[in-house]
Amino acid sequence: MPLNDRETTQGPVLVTGARGFIASHVIRRLRERAAMGNGADSQVIGLVRGAPGEGEIACDLHDAAAVEETVRRLRPAACIHAAWEIDPAKYRNDERNERWV
């Protein structure tokens, strides 16, 4: 599906942190665009840390081999990275977010 009005994709769009606040809205919007005919043949797949639900795949982003296998298998056209630590008291300076980069 087009990520903007001038682009088309040739594979699924992966969204990390799929159940998070930002990623869930991104996924919803991309799926709405696909349903309106803007690339309806493209798939939006959420990557999650735990057990996957519909339209999701479990993938530990801190496991390089798992990430490589997932990318090799799915051959995505794009990935939107929205996974990060969300503890409200410290997320802005949480050192664990360095791992997400």
Image: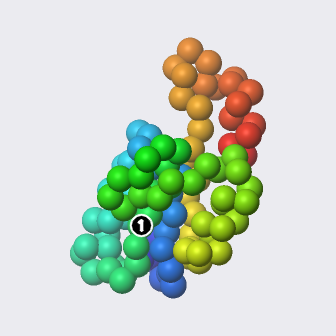
Q: Residue at x 35, y 53 (%)?
A: 53
Q: Residue at x 74, y 27 (%)?
A: 95
Residue to which mark 1 is pinned: 44
The image shows residue 4, relative to residue 22, as above or below, that is below
Q: Residue at x 48, y 74 (%)?
A: 12
- Answer with the quarter of the image where residue 80 lies: bottom right
Spot the residue most to the left.
Answer: 36
Instruction: Say whether residue 5 is left or right of residue 32.
Output: right
Q: Quadrant of the N terminus?
A: bottom left
* Residue 58 percent location from the top left of the image: 51, 54
* Residue 72 percent location from the top left of the image: 65, 75
Q: Residues within 10 Å of mark 1 (few under 14, many from 20)?
A: many
Quick check: can you spot residue 29? no
* Residue 2 percent location from the top left of the image: 44, 76
Instruction: Say whether residue 86 is left or right of residue 40.
Output: right
Q: Amino acid at mark 1?
A: Val
